[in-house]
Structure formats: structure tokens, C-alpha cells
Image: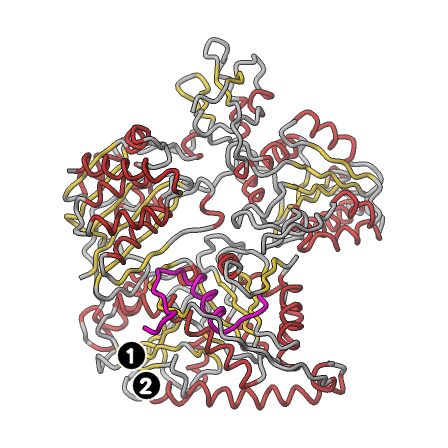
Amino acid sequence: MRSGDKRELLSGNEAVARGAYAAGVRVACAYPGTPSTEILEELTKLPGVYCEWSPNEKVALEVGIGACLGGARTLVAMKHVGLNVAADPWMTLPYIGVNAGLVLVVADDPGMHSSQNEQDSRYYARMAGVPLLEPSDSMEAYRMVGAAFELSERYDTPVLLRLETRVSHSRTVVEYEDQRREVDFPYEKDAVKRVMIPGHARLRHPVLLRRLEELAREAEISPFNRVEMRSDRVGIVTSGVCYQYVREAFPEASVLKLGFVYPLPERIARDFASHFRRLYVVEELEPFLEEALKALGLDVMGKARIPREGELDPDLVGSSLAEIMEMDTGLQDGGWNRPEAARAPRSSTLPSRPPVMCPGCPHRGLFYVLSRMKLVVSSDIGCYTLSVLPPVSGIDCQVCMGAGVGMALGLERAFAGSEVNASYRGKVVGTLGDSTFIHGGITGLIDMVYNRIPCTIIILDNRTTAMTGFQDHPGTGKTLMGEKTHALDLEALCRAVGVESVRVVDPWDLEGTEKALREEVGSDHTSVIISRRPCTLMRRSPHPVYRVDEEECTGCRRCLRLGCPALVMRGEKAWVDEGLCAGCSMCAQLCRPGALREVEDGD
Amino acid sequence: MVTDVVLAGVGGQGNVLSARILAEAAMRAGYRVKTSEVHGMAQRGGSVVCMVRWGEEVYSPLIPRGRADFLLAYELLEGLRFLEYLRPGGTAVVNDYRLDPLPVLRGDAAYPEDALGLIREASGKCVVLRARDLAEEAGSARAVGTVMLGALSVFLQFPRTAWEDSLRQRVPPRALEANLRAFEMGRKAAG
């Protein structure tokens, strides 16, 4: 190791940050989203890099485009669905090219650990005509970021670096350079190249296509594509974390490990295929590699055996392929390193443990009231989405960030003109978080006011981006780099777009919340209710807790309607786990005999 | 030779931090290490599993079922849920603690009454301890994970300094003394 080099156990996300730092990145932007969030959180700890939480992914990429044109190596990070939001600039950026390098890191979430879909972002590389790199662990992620910047500049193109949950959130030892290279490119005006009026864009599209041909030649010599010859009977093509599963499940198989995944290195693939009767392709989600290999006319087996949905693991890779490989090659189980079966009950027979809203979560109060009022509730992405689960069951529909507003408008219009759904008229509310309102909700609200829609929007303002781990946003008054800044005034913003009725409620106050809702929902104008209380997990000060007076408790289970994990039945009486209780008092508000009493926290 | 540990618990119990401390101790002991963690929505009181693997060469961050040498169960049901990862003859370190999940609280499902028995039956060796009591005794109710690691450490040949340095790096300074005590109490409970 050279001086300045370090050796540390890093997650894939931290390794990306380290790789970008060593490559001299000067601007980095992102909107938080699991499993990508820690990239910027790590990068902002390092000196000399401007890091920001952008209001959404589209803005993040636009900032990134400006920064790379301005001569700074730039990293933009987001989760897979974030790239949908950024797709507009993404599709035209390859036309105008870069100046200093731009690397877009996108983190897919096969298995949807923390996501609403499991789209395969590799198609965004093919759709935009952008080279795609895919690391299989932290060390490779570190190396690929540096290589991606060089590739970006050499070919005048953005580069897509695709991570998956098991790369982002697994740790391996990374040897890294703890030093920042200084990179600075001069800015030069070039309107024909960078202003995409149709006449210019027609000139640039052929440039993009020629570039792709050159990149295909580059892929043939990339150090990230390698052939590991072992068995002369079983040949597997794979990329990303699946490479690790393949090595685990079929240690003797020969492997074409792709890291420079798009454009596909066709010559390498054909050479590898020539050694085997048939190739097996192991990839998560869509048959991206499989289709490209089939287009070369190769005999390929992939999604016919391996699931197209969900996350893979060594067991699934082994069990999916063992039989067909044995039939094809005569090798027992195709060489699957099959573990001995464990003597455990099937985990599917056990009670599930879904994530729940925390004790004291302010969202619980609001959604409890919405559910009680039997409203039609559209919502979006955040901890509050958990209130769809029983017993609160407070959400009707949800697709993406900010959508709670637009969907409410659409529902309201549909009901307004309907006979069969007349009973839902005046019962629609749209809900969304403080961060997601800024991300993608404000334009929907402008729509609502503009088109004079009588509907109520509820902003769940918990003063943070809670679900991804408490990131700041334009409403919190603090930047990612820890500086104090103007805190966006949500009330003033709503009034400024023309909402006449804007009011604030405390969602811990069930009666006050219900009163405000009864006054606004079904009125003849657009209204906004801001349900405001900081996320309970951010609270550090001591607080009282609640305790059940067993003499008074009638065992009516009314308090259980809140679905609070701190509140359970013990025999015929309710019982509060004081170690978990956050002292929000909502259970006491529901308790008719007054059996739930406030006591000082003994812990 | 690869050594595999599955750490199964409930969001908020601290097994993500434990996995990190374990992995760093393994690295300090001179091994190649891989871990797998859970972040985001799943952490909110849900079932959380982490995996730590070390040896001369480690590939998958996910441990195949039936391969784990050790199962650290922070909660009984979660231990049972991931028991299928333990290899025959493997060792279970079990926190004797039951936390009912929502479907059980609501009466939609029954908590498996014999969870501990099933874990005992499937494992070659089973260490049972009350980690929360020991952690409180050590001076920090939050040091449950450190008690569990202390118990695990009895079965591993990591130098003492590898553990202490990792704890020092990951635990806030004011909680360090309590965590070192918690580690020791875990060792005693298993030894």
C-alpha cells in the first residue's frame, strides 16, 4: 500500500463515496432513498466536496449536469424509482455530453426491502445510450467509480453505475486512497453541442450512436469483464452481486463475469460461449443480459428457470439451475454446492413481523382519525404508508412520491361526475410528507388551486425525512453540509399558490385533529391541513409514560385500535410496555374509563 | 474455511450495530470479511436479519440456508425464523426474550410457544441468556447486542484486543465502560 492508503470495512455505498472522493469529485447531489442514501451521507464527511440534498432527483441531475459542464467531476445518486423522476434530463444528457465526468449512481432494490416496485434500472442505460457498470462488491464499487469518471470524460458521456441492495448494504474490506485528486476542466461555450433545439439535437443523435459503437469496443477490453475458466462443462454469465451467488452455489463452474455490462462485449461473450453447449445466465430481475446474448444467436438458459421477480440468493441460484444443468451436462446437480437441509420449521409457517409505526409516531393519530371518518385517502411514500396496515387501515391508494395530491384531485373529479360513487363526494383527502410535498407534491397543489378543486390536502410535517434515516430537506432549516439555512415556510408556500384555508394541527391531539378535518373536508374550496409534530425518534428529552390502572381497565380493547406496539393485552387487561411508551397520550384519549394514566418515566 | 454468523432480531434491538462490531473484530483478527445489513423501512419494528462471514475467501454476502455456524437470536421468534440458516450441529446463542409481533397482538396469529425448544433441538449447542437483564446490570439497557457478542466470543479465537478495539470504535465513549462490562457478562454467561 502506498502512503495515504487505508484499509477499512466499507459498505458498497461508502465505497462509492470513497471512490468518488479519490477521483476528485467536487459536486455531489442526491435525494435520499433506500438503498442509496449513505452515499451522500458519507461523501459529505469528506473535505472539498460540495454535497447537497436536492428537493428531488430531477433537480439533483440538473444540478449535476450544470456542475459537470462547469468543469467539476460530479456524482449524482438516487434509488431506482428516483431515476424515473430524473428521466427527463437523463434522456437528453447523452446528446449534449459532459465536460468533466458525470457518474449517476442508481441503487436497485430487488425484493423490495424498502421500495414500491422492483424495476430494473439497467434498461435506463440502454434506453439513453449510456455505458453501464455494475459492481459485485464494495472493492469493485470503489474501483468502478474512478474508472467511470475517466470513461465519462474520454467518451463525453454520462456513465450509469448500478448498485443493488446487497451491494449497497453489504460490507467488504476496501483498500482505498484517502486523498483527493484535483481535477478541474475549463468551461467553454458550445451552444450547438449543448442547446438541444431540434436542429442541434439532430446533429447530436448520430454522435451518440457512433459513441455507442466505440463504447462497445471499449467493453471488449474493460478490466471489469473477465473470464474465469474452471469446468469445461458448465459456463455461467453473470454480473453484479449475482456473481457472488454463482461462486457460492457453483464453485467449479466457469464464469463470464461482466462489470462493463452495456454495451455488451459481444466478442468476449461469443468466445466464452464457444466452450460450452449452452450458457446459463444468472441475473436478478429482468432478462437484460439474457436477451442481449440471445440476440447474438447463442443458446442461453436464464429466466426460464430463475425467478424474474424478487431477490436471488445462493440457495435460489443453486436450486433453480441444478436440475437443468444435470440434464444438460450429466454432472450431479450441475455441481451445486448444496448445503445440508436444516431441521427448522419453515419460516413461512411463523407469524410475520411487518414493520410498524413507532410508539408515539405522529402519523398514527392523523391516520387513526382519517380511518374513523371513513374518508377516501390517497397517499405517497414515507413511514406513514405503514398506516395502510390494520388496525389503522387508513390509506386507499399510493404509487409514488407526491402523488397523494394529484390522485386526490382525480378521485374528486371522478366522484363529482358519478352516480354510483356519489356517496364518496366530498370525502377525498390527499396525504403526503413534508419532504415529499417539496419533492413532488407542490405542483399537484398548484393544479388543484388552478382548477378550483374542492379537496383537502394534509401535509404530514414531521420535520425530517424520517424513513430513510432523518435527512434534512428544504423545510428543516439545515443543509446536508450542516449549515443553517432558510427553512421553507410550508404555510406561506401553500397560501402563495392560492390556498385560502391553511391550518396547522397537532396529530397527538385526536379531538383537535378531527375537528379541523370535519371543518375542511367537504368544503367548497381547496384546503391544506398541516399535521405537525417532529418524528418521535428524534426526541432526546425525558418524557412521561402511560400506565394502565388495572382496577379501572374494563378490557374493552378500544386503545388497541391505534396499533401501538407499546400497548398489548395481558390477559383481560391492557398493558403498556413502559420501555417502549413514548408518552404521546393517544391511548389515554381513547380510554373511556380513564384507566391509562400518565406517570414519570422510571427508566 | 468460512465462518458464518446470522444475527436475527427486531428493528431497534441493535443487531445491525452488533454485526458491524463483529465484522470489524473479524477483520482485526486478520480475516477477509463480508456482511449483509438491512436499512430503511424494514427497520421500523420489523424483522431484521444481518449476516457476517469471514475466512480466507468469502463470496456471497448472504449465507446459504443450512450453512451458518452460529445463530444469534436477539428475540425468540426471530431466532426461529432464521433457524433454517443454522448448519446441523451449529451453535445458537439465544436471548430469552419474547416480543409479540402485530399479528400476534391482534390475535390473528399465535406466537410459537416452544420457540426456545425448537431452537435447542435444531442446534448442536445452545446458549440461553437474558441479555437485557445482563445489559442493565452492566449499566446500559441498550448494550443487549454487546452481551450477545460477548457470549459468541467464547466460541471464537479472536484476540481480545480485536473485540475491544471494535467496541471502542463503534460505541459512544460514555457508554464504552458499560459495554465492556456487558461483553464480559456475556462471556461469563456462555462460558
Q: What residue sits right under mark 1 in the picture?
A: A235
Range of magenta residues? A1-29
Residue, x 68% and y 55% (percent of image)? A440
Quarter of the image with the C terminus of chain A is top left
User: Tag 1's secondary structure?
Assistant: strand
Q: CA distance from mark 2 to mark 1?
A: 8 Å
Which comes before the other along the chain, label 2 or label 1?
1
- Residue A370, above or below B91: above
**Disc 2 residue type (three-letter):** Phe
Tell me what residue is drawn at x 21 percent, y 79 percent. Answer: A231
Residue A206 located left or right of residue A274: right
Looking at the image, can residue A87 be seen? yes
Q: Residue at x 26, y 66 (%)?
A: A249
Badge 2: residue crowd in 10 Å (few <14, some 14–19, many ≥20): many
The verdict on residue B19 being magenta is no
Q: Residues within 10 Å of mark 1 (few under 14, many from 20)?
A: many
Amino acid type, label 1:
Gly
Q: Is residue A3 magenta?
A: yes
Would residue A279 be found to the left or right of residue A530 on screen? left
**Which residue in the protein does label 2 denote?**
A272
- Quarter holding residue A141: bottom left
Image spot of residue B173 (x, y percent): 38, 42
Extreme residue toward the top, this view: A551
